[in-house]
Image (cartoon, rainbow, N blue to C red):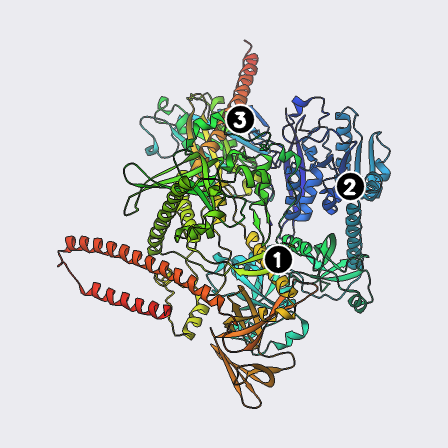
Amino acid sequence: MLQKREKVLLLRTFQGRTLRIVREHYLRPSVPCHSPLCPQPAACRNDGKLLSAEVTHYVIPDWKVVQDYLEILEFPELQGVIFMQTACQAVQHQRGWRQYNKLRNLLRDARHDCVLFANEFQQHCYVPREKGESMEKWQTRSIYNAAVWYYHHCLDRMPIVMVTEDEEAVQQYGSETEGVFVISFKNYLDNFWPDLKAAHELCDSILQSRRERESENQESHGKEYPEHLPLEVLEAGIKSGRYIQVREVTNHCEFEATLRLHSKFQVRLVSDILIHGMKARNRSIHGDVVVVELLPKNEWKGRTAALCENESEDKALGDAPSEPMPTGRVVGILQKNWRDYVVTFPSKEEIQCQGRNAQKVLATPWDYRIPKIRISTQQAEALQDFRVVVRIDSWESTSVYPNGHFVRVLGRIGDLEGEIATILVENSISVIPFSEAQMCKMPVNTPENPWKVSPQEEQVRKDLRSTHLVFSIDPKGCEDVDDALSVRTLNNGNLELGVHIADVTHFVAPNSYIDIEARTRATTYYLADRRYDMLPSILSADLCSLLGGVDRYAVSVMWELHKSSYEIQKVWYGRTIIRSAYKLCYEAAQELLEGNFSVVDDIPEFKDMDLESRQAKLEELVWALGKLTDIARHVRAKRDCCGALELEGVEVRIQLDEKKNIHDLIPKQPLEVHETVAECMILANHWVAKKIWESFPHQALLRQHPPPHQEFFSELRECAKAKGFFIDTRYSSSFFSPCRVSLYLGCPEIDYRHFCASVTMAGLVFLQAAQHSQKQSTELFQCTYFKDKGPEMEERCIADGVIYSIRTNGVLVFIPRFGIKGAAYLKNKDGLVISCGPDSRSEWKPGSLHRFQNKITSTTTGGESTTLQLFDHVTVRISVQALRCHSDTIRLEIISNKPYVTPNMERPQQSSIVLKSELVKEVTRSVEEAQLAQEVRAKALQEECEEYCQTKGRSLYTLLEEIRDLALLDVSDSCGA
Amino acid sequence: MAGLELLSDQGYRIDGRRAGELRKIQARMGVFAQADGSAYIEQGNTKALAVVYGPHEIRGSRSRALPDRALVNCQYSSATFSTGERKRRPHGDRKSCEMGLQLRQTFEAAILTQLHPRSQIDIYVQVLQADGGTYAACVNAATLAVMDAGIPMRDFVCACSAGFVDGTALADLSHVEEAAGGPQLALALLPASGQIALLEMDARLHEDHLEQVLEAAAQAARDVHTLLDRVVRQHVREASILLGD
């Protein structure tokens, strides 16, 4: 039976009056205690997480401890932690949702031995706040009261330690009840966990930063920043349209930020808002949701167009800004998006420069967009060679930089492992190995105890093992084969195309430990040389990997296609059992497709076969591959007709030699097989998405692309104009379908693998972090590659580049060979400009630069002038600029304004082969497209003829259409030649 | 700033109830001797007083009289001191008119009006303290008052509100939960037959969830019925003792 109590709250209204609010509060005789020692488990209804039975004591942190030392309580070593509801609510009210959500996740996480006890709803634990009692005292009192009750509830069998920061509480309650100890947190760590060094360090660093903050509050500095406006004012301002709510996106410079508008606020302004200077940014950090006030129009500034190196002296270079754009200043922050940041402490000399205050150290974040963070620590010297994770605590209006504390060490600067850890932390990726509790639920597959298809499953699943030729095509050395393909002729002559995805859901039950873990990981991260799995390797690399020659569960989509027109007649979805016959790699598949059978020996499945059966099997496989390619071409042609987006970019593969040194960077060769596989997956996704949407309309996770924003095309249009093309961007379909624009604006991230993942694990969120980290790790390897090269490899570092953007003091260059984009200066720090003589070699000479819309001209004092145009080819030298605090960056230097000529002619030949096959593909595709279009047109014409009784035959319209087609063909011919 | 956490991970609401639990209900019948019927109800901190006059001759213009059934006239008002801030609420404002109409619809469905043609039944409800679910409290108070007046009804009319938070339906919302802005549904039920006398919702809720919320509200209304039934029986017992049987 519930008991009713009343709580009286006094709130202050916006007008300043006090408001008396009476809230009900219901108490119950029992709430779940989550303890294995509970004498009445039935009454307590302990479902879900229980505390471990092996602990020597239970810890109950006071509200202040939960607020300040949550990071230490997160250590998995600390077991038997009971969070009282009172403490959790204090966190929620005083520390905001971010911290509270962290606490909630901790409580949900099965690996952490901690529970929540709802003491305020328990009739014996609840203590009403007394008149005149401060909130803090009442919270401590009710937590202590609950601790005592808990101790007696467990029949006095388990000692309880309440840790508090309140000295008075230690005095008052310390010896009140036997078995319930009240000590300070520092004391607790010293006595119970003397060996847990990391926790001690963390504790010290938190303590110190808090002390700093306190002492700072006492000092009254001059304010560095204007105060943020109170929340109500902001909300009212946003509603009235005076302020604008935006998410901050920092641009390339430390002192300049641009804000991207939330789409719903785009009514009034179409472009971004510029925030100029640290003062106007007013303590907002990249990723925060901020409120901005626009400045009057005469104070608007233009974006700096000069290249900037993020170094102080370069700031002065920002000359001749571009046309003014909306400029504003931040008046308040709605949501802080602080996360863990990787920083580097300054080296010894720099510390001395900073001088007078040795305890505070300004650490430089790895991410350029984050301001320097002030850390209070005494270990600065010991940590100066390491990459370190820190957390921002606060940013007062009196301080130039935010205050933070040190969390943990990642690794030495320049060490590959450390740098990779940096990338992972910067992208908030967690890579802890899977725990025991999670692994014990997993099926086993060992040589002694092999995994088998169970008879029950055999009955419910469609068995494709004997009827279908299933094979997979993946990159070389791929372990997690998650998709496979099949094609065969049916009895009625039609074709059957099948796409099979590993059935992960069979092994991962919803809401199981693995499922929860996988949800937090969200995806498998593919870095340049390694990957971090979403699921344990027993699943991802074995049981849920469609390897050759073994039985696997799968989810399949199968289409029946018409024998000649490849129209989809029927579609079937379901769970199946398959046995993949071949595990091909892209290269081998392409070779087979082109009729080159020399690769056969490399395919392990063919190795121990006699010659005859081998020949038969091979023919079967080659037929299937050919058919598949045919179908894919057709499907693609159809898709292109309806308008499809195609993004091309250069991806680089890293080849490591035996000693794990980087041997070479190879741009990934686009093969037709890639497209074939991707096309099948897109088809499968398309149909599955359709099915999901039909069956679960409100739960379907579909991606919808909004119509492209006209503003984003303006740059592209200008680029095209420079070369004399005109691109019509008004209708997105006319932009995407007829002229396939393949730009050198690299976009290597689009990968159909993510789509597969979203098919197999329903409800997965598409994460950008994975792509970011993938890109960054590739960049890291690129740097390492060029760094290691000595002078003898000089010519390796010289490559051909294409100019894709022009700035006031330099150009941005794309290098197709390595897939690198970077900046090249035309004016160096001494004010000298580049000039190319008659032999096209470049030299630094005094002179001046003139920037036009599509070109840049440097004129030396001697009167020679060099002009670089957009899309010009130049020769660049690649070098690596080593930076202590950030990742190394690649520097480019233009050494000649002529395209680079390779000394040996091997490579161009190769690329011409590629070009040729590419060309063949292109031609077949365009023929198919034309055919399809013809059919459609004919049909439409026929209908019109019937409807309007028009004369049959060639109308003026078709004639004009044909002329237009001819014109298009001409252009492509001249391009090909 | 995000709002309050209406339903914690452990399944508790802000005031300590679980999702399907009602607030404490206390009620009394026959609080005023002058009126034909009266009742007072407390649902948590929501307190309402209902008074019934009738059936009697039509007051005012005779033309309003209905030839085949009684006219049900409902008036709703709330006290100036019913909320945290004292506020004058004149009669005939939009909100109380709407509430009056809703009550009228509810009771026209429940009272056997055809037994009293050409007559009038007046129901006056006043909310003394508002803490969420005023409609439900008014209906429940009026039911008791109508019974106290001895007017024949098909069945009890029991009302309760329900809301929807994070995939869970919450029964009997308090003011804090209402103010959070989620969907809210008010249901008046004739519990014996399971017929719905009135169903009102003015927020957006996905069709698929409606069933669940409706079921929660109906279950809560049935629980209310058990309690009201107990109150009525108790009242009848006391009355019969007074009469000296």
Answer left or right for A544 relative to A382.
left
Which amino acid, mark 2? Lys
Q: Nearer the viewer, mark 1 or mark 2?
A: 1
Q: Identify the residue under disc 1.
A: A333
Q: Nearer the viewer, mark 3 or mark 2?
A: 2
Chain where mark 2 sits = A
Residue that protrudes farthest toward the top in the picture: B245
Q: Residue at x 55, y 81 (%)?
A: A841
* Callout 3–callout 2 Cβ contact below 8 Å: no
The picture places residue A519, in percent across and down from the top left corner, at: 57, 42
Q: Which labelled disc corresponds to residue A137?
A: 2
Identify the image quadrant of residue A487: top left
Which secondary structure, mark 2? helix
Q: Which labelled disc corresponds to residue A95?
A: none
The picture places residue A615, in percent across and down from the top left corner, at: 39, 43
Answer left or right for A338 relative to A616.
right
Q: Residues within 10 Å of mark 1 (few under 14, many from 20)?
A: many
Q: CA distance from mark 3 to mark 2?
A: 44 Å
Which secondary structure, mark 1? strand
Q: Nearer the viewer, mark 1 or mark 3?
A: 1
Report the number of numbered marks: 3
Q: Which labelled disc corresponds to residue B39?
A: 3
Looking at the picture, tell me which residue is in the foreground, A706 or A904: A904
Which amino acid, mark 3? Ala
Q: Residue at x 48, y 41 (%)?
A: A605
* Callout 1–callout 2 Cβ contact below 8 Å: no
